[in-house]
Amino acid sequence: MTFEAIRKMALELDNVEEAKSYGTPAFKVGGAMIARLRDDIGALVVRMSIEDRQELIEADPETYFITDHYLEYPYILVKLARVTPDAMRDLLRGAWRSAAAEKKKGKAKTRR
């Protein structure tokens, strides 16, 4: 997968904007990051629950992995050279849903 193909997929999702995170290209919805490029390791960091990421890593450790830095955060690393377009599209949609749900929760709390 190329980052250009990922950019196109991400920007097709509602309210997703391109941004920067730690100086690298990223995608956010409502200010919440859904993905960012880790070109230094040939991967994309994608928002995902810790439980779901463990299942993916166990199912396909050649494509999905984690580093110590991300152990406590709801993200997974995805090797760009191995992920399929369909899988990446599903990952981005899931990350978008997760970020959108978090934003709704935050709005509900501030309204109280």
Image: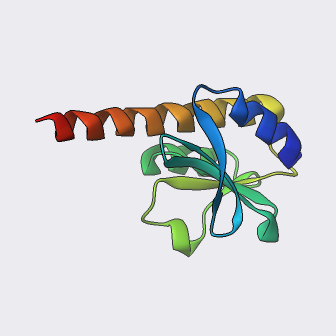
Q: Looking at this view, is 104 or 88 the one in front?
A: 104
Please state the horizontal and vertical placement of residue 57, each as a whole percent of the image: 62, 51
**Percent position of residue 27, x then y:** 64, 46
Q: Left or right of 63: which side holds 75?
A: left
The correct choice, above or below, for 74 with respect to 28 in the image is: below
| Residue depicted at x 71% and y 33% | 11
Q: Residue furthest left?
A: 112
Q: Position of residue 5 (x, y in %)?
A: 86, 38
Quadrant assignment for the N terminus: top right
Pick whichever, 16 or 85, lies toward us: 16
**Residue 39 locus on image (x, y percent):** 80, 64
Q: Which residue lies at the image location 75% right of the left edge and 32% below the top edge?
A: 9
Foreground residue among 3 and 59: 3
- Quarter occupied by residue 112: top left
- 110 relative to 74, above or below: above
Q: How many marks?
A: 0
Between 93 and 23, the residue placed more toward the observer is 23
Q: Is residue 87 visible?
A: no
* Residue found 54% across the figure and 73% down from its top: 69
